[in-house]
Amino acid sequence: MSKKIGILTYYWPPAGGSGVQRWLRFSNELAKLGHDIHVFTFKNPKYPIVDKELLNKVDSKVKVNFISGFELPNFLTNKNSNSAESFKSSGVKSFVRELFFFPDSRKYLISPSVKYIKKYIKKTPLNCIITSGPPHSMHLVGLKLKKTTNLKWIADFRDPWSNFVQNKFLNKLESTKIKHEKKENLVLKFSDAVLTTSKSLNNKFKKKNHNTFYTPSGFENFIKPKAYNKFRILYAGSMKEFQNPINLWIVLGELIESDNSFKNLVEIVLIGSIDKNITENKEFRLLQNTKIVSYLSKNNLDKEISISELLMVCSVNIEGSNDIIPGKFFHYLSSRKRILGITNKGTDLENIIKETKSGMSFSYDNHTDLKNYIYKCFSDYKEGKASSQKTDNKFLSSNIASKIDKIVSKL
């Protein structure tokens, strides 16, 4: 049965990067299923990446509404910095953020969002509202709406909250950490349903809200592979200092040094915002045949992926940060190319690479197995063996949206 569904999301076209893709795709697919979709996002947002081509991806049936509100000034956000220092933000700046911008820098969007949506539903009643975080301020909008209206509410966690990696750097006070946990628990308690993007986070949240559902981000459609005259290893997206795969750079350097064929054919491409502490690292600087490209639109990135042989994804190399599956994993999965995971043992990323049989993952301290695997992939490439992997259609956005449709229908 058709429902009027509200979706509150900070990231919406022309925002670029992987964060925008999830609800852009699900909004379109839910509209195709016959639901009346009302998106709530913001005027003049501070997006670190812009991809105007994505504006053309929004289904004409999706109604997009823009909310005005104050955001944290750029001098406090380090908008243009990808360094881990932007998370560490030492001194007065960090203290100001922790004390006055809880739970995050979009705190002052909460009240105008509640006011706007309350006014909106008086004229256009909605059956439910979905809030997507981070920023987790969006969930506090949902919490206030739940307590003051009859709206059904779904909280969508694209990333963890109390265990959010940025919070590990920003929040130094124990009292702040407790506040995050308390707010997270309130969201889990009062939401009618919860969506997560990893199985371990789903299991954790299910103990607090039995109506919790593992809902991977998936991908829109398959990328058609193309032939290329280089053995290309590609990384796409931001790579922060705590994701630096130093052993990979060492392995690649050894293969280049020991095998002229590998040296002549390998091409190492990093696309996106790469921490300068990685590109200036001695192991990386010693590599030959590297290419660093700034952000590309999704359409152009699809083309780069289509001619690559190995697609690299790195987990967060920080203790306790095991419950994140980067959105780029599903983007890679859509190409049916081999995925090379650099990840700690037991992470959701390692598990989903195994589950999908989409490649291999290696721990950050692995050397020998990683080297052997890369050389095997290279040998297959030279022999003309296709690297195409089988990919389950269950990860198509249209099929995942059908599951969300059932969740909404049961509220």
Image (cartoon, rainbow, N blue to C red):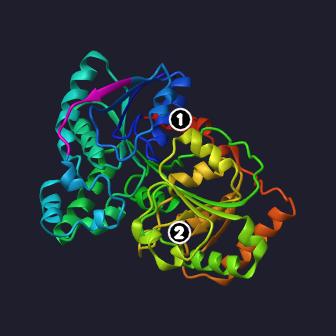
Q: Residues within 10 Å of mark 2 (few under 14, many from 20)?
A: many
Q: Which residue is mark 2?
A: 347
Name the residue nearer the viewer: 88 or 184.
88
Q: Secondary structure at mark 1?
A: helix
**Residue 112 at what x, y percent from top left?**
18, 34
Residue 103 visible? The answer is no
What residue is at 44 percent from the left and 72 percent from the top? 280
- Of all residues, the one furthest to the right in this rendering is 383
What segment is highlighted magenta in the picture? 64-71
The three-letter amino acid code for the residue at tag 2 is Thr
Residue at horizontal 62%, vertical 52%? Answer: 332
Magenta segment includes 65: yes
The label number, if any, that marks residue 406 in the structure image: 1
Q: Which mark is residue 190?
A: none
Quadrant where the image shows the C terminus: top left
Q: Nearer the viewer, mark 1 or mark 2?
A: 2
Residues 98 and 382: in front is 382
Residue 269 point in image, percent of width and height: 59, 59
- Residue 368 drawn at (x, y percent): 67, 84
Lateral position of residue 212 relative to residue 42, left or right: right
- Is 317 left, or right, of 141 in this rendering? right
Res. 266 in view: yes
Q: Secondary structure at mark 2?
A: loop
**Residue found 49% across the figure and 38% down from its top:** 407
Asked whether residue 150 is drawn in magenta, I would say no
